[in-house]
Each structure stands twice: as C-alpha cells, then as structure tokens.
Image (cartoon, grey):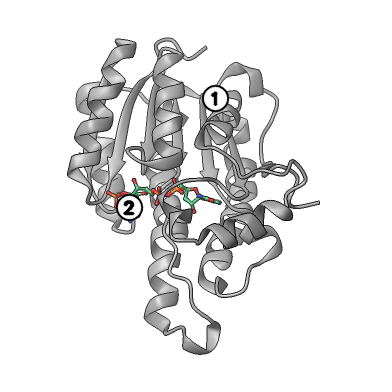
Amino acid sequence: MLKDKVAVITGGVRGIGKAIAHKFCESGADVILIYRSNDEEAAKTSEELKQYGTEVHLIKGDVAEPKTAAETVAYIKEHFGKVDILVNNAGITNDKLMMRMSPEDFDKVINANLSGAFYMMKEISTLMIKKRSGSIINMASVSGLKGNPAQVNYSASKAGIVGMTMSAAKELGRRGIRVNAIAPGFIETDMTAVLTDEQKEAAAGNITLGRLGKPEDIANAALFLASDMGSYITGQTISVDGGIIM
Ligand code: NAP
C-alpha cells in the first residue's frame, strides 16, 4: 500500500510511533524516524525494522525546536528528494492540577505537542506542495476532545491539533495534500505505564469495547489515512478509542 513512499514519523521509535513505523515499513515505505533522547530504543527499533527490507533512517532532534524541522527537510532533500507522508506523533504529558501547574509546565507541553507539529507541517508541506501530493497525520487525543482533570496543558495542545489540522487541510487541499488527525483513547504504551492496575481497570470500565487500546490499533488507522484508502478524507479527526468518546 505504501510502496516507494517516504514517511517521516516523529516519536517513531517507541509506543504508537514505533507501531506506525512497523506498519508503514511492512507496507513498503521508507521511513525517517525522529526521536528526542532514547538512543537505545532508537537503535533497537531501527534494527527490528530491517526485517521489511525498506530504508530506515534516524534523526535525533527535539521537535519543539524549529531547527529540527528545517534539518529534517535538508535531510530529506539529500537522501530522498521527496516526502509523501508526515506523522506528527511525538508528544509528552506533564500532568498536574491547574492550581499547581506553572507557566513552564504549560508551555513545555504546548511546545512539544502543538508547536512541534506546526513546525514540522510548515516545513515538510513545502516539499509536498512541489509535487502536489502528500498525507499529513497529526496525533490528537481523546483528552483534546473532552478534557481530563490534571491535563489542562495536554488537552489544550491536543484540542489545538484538531483546529490546526482543519486549517491546514483547508490551506493545502487544492495542492493535493490531505491533513487529518487521529484521536487515540487509552493506549498501552510507556505514556500510560505510569498508571496503577486499579487506574487501568477503572479506565477500561469506561471504554465501550471493554479494553485498553494497543499501539497497533492506532497504526492501522494511520495506514488507512496515509494510503490511497483514505484519498477522499481530509480535515478530519478520527477517534480510535474503543468508543470512549461517545
Ligand atoms: P510514548 O510511548 O511516551 O512515546 C513518545 C515518543 O515521542 C518517544 O519516541 C519520544 O522520544 C518522542 N518525543 C517526545 N517528545 C519529543 C520531542 N520534543 N521531540 C522529539 N521526539 C519527542 O508516547 P505514546 O503513548 O506512544 O504517544 C504517542 C502520541 O500519541 C503522543 O502524541 C500522545 O500524546 C498521543 N496519545 C497517546 C495516548 C496513549 O494512551 N498512549 C492517548 C492519546 C494520545 P524519546 O523517547 O527519545 O524522548
């Protein structure tokens, strides 16, 4: 489904991003995975992905810094000359009640989750515009659609992703570029590993399908949106959450 496509996946070496990298490589894509700090996990993921026989490239950089997006474009030009898919998946949480949340706590999450996605979209869409095609997928969250206590910073960043996705879709649609978002529910990754078993059980109790999601559940939706299967879909936020948002 993605033969000869080139995909950039931010936060692509762990959790949901890693599952997306597996799915994309399995479908024939070459991938550039951006990560911030975890060299060990990056090397491990890159090794695992070799089984699919496509190209796997790693870039270490902080998406909250505009220069990372510019460096990524330079890298793409040098190694591939084109890019077809961008998945803005990198994200962090820094949960605390609003009364204890400092301006720095707020800004840090906004910068990584929202500004980072903006910098990457702005730079990488310039390459997509030249060839008049591309698919951009931004990672939102159920928290950005219905809020969560102790996540004012996180839900603001993810609600921002939903709005930014629609605006970018409207700007880029006539240039052949689709922009969509996925809003995962409760997915089993390092991000949610900090929760106790009781908290996970309580969360599962609120999920219509009665279970937490797996990174592969999100990767399947990403493959659909990235490929021609999603060729008439743009500006949408697709919830992949086991029915928690209803
Ligand atoms: P995760 O396991 O914590 O992995 C996050 C990845 O993002 C890591 O590879 C990390 O790299 C990278 N990253 C974080 N900040 C970065 C930055 N500033 N620059 C570059 N890379 C950065 O998270 P996950 O659970 O897979 O979540 C992936 C996305 O889905 C996030 O946007 C998250 O908000 C969203 N989401 C997750 C859930 C869930 O239940 N898990 C639910 C809704 C939405 P390093 O390890 O190198 O730091």
Compared with residue 154, is residue 217 higher up or lower down, i.e. above or below?
A: above
Secondary structure of residue under mark 2: loop
Q: Which mark is residue 63?
A: 2
Q: Secondary structure at mark 1?
A: helix
Question: In the image, what residue type sits under mark 1?
Answer: Leu
Numbered circle sitting on residue 10? none
Furthest residue toward right: 246
How far across and how far down the image is residue 113, in percent? 45, 57
Mark 2 vs mark 1, CA separation in Å: 22 Å
- What residue does disc 1 label? 223
* Res 50 seen here: yes
Q: From the viewer's perspective, is 173 left or right of 25?
A: right
The answer to whether residue 163 is above or below residue 78 is: below
- As drawn, 192 above or below 78: below
Answer few, some or many: residues within 10 Å of disc 1's Cα (few below 14, many 20 plus, some between 14 and 19): many
Closer-to-camera residue (231/40) = 40
Residue 172 x/y as whole percent: 57, 38
Disc 2 crowd rating (10 Å Cα; few below 14, some 14-19, many 20+) is many
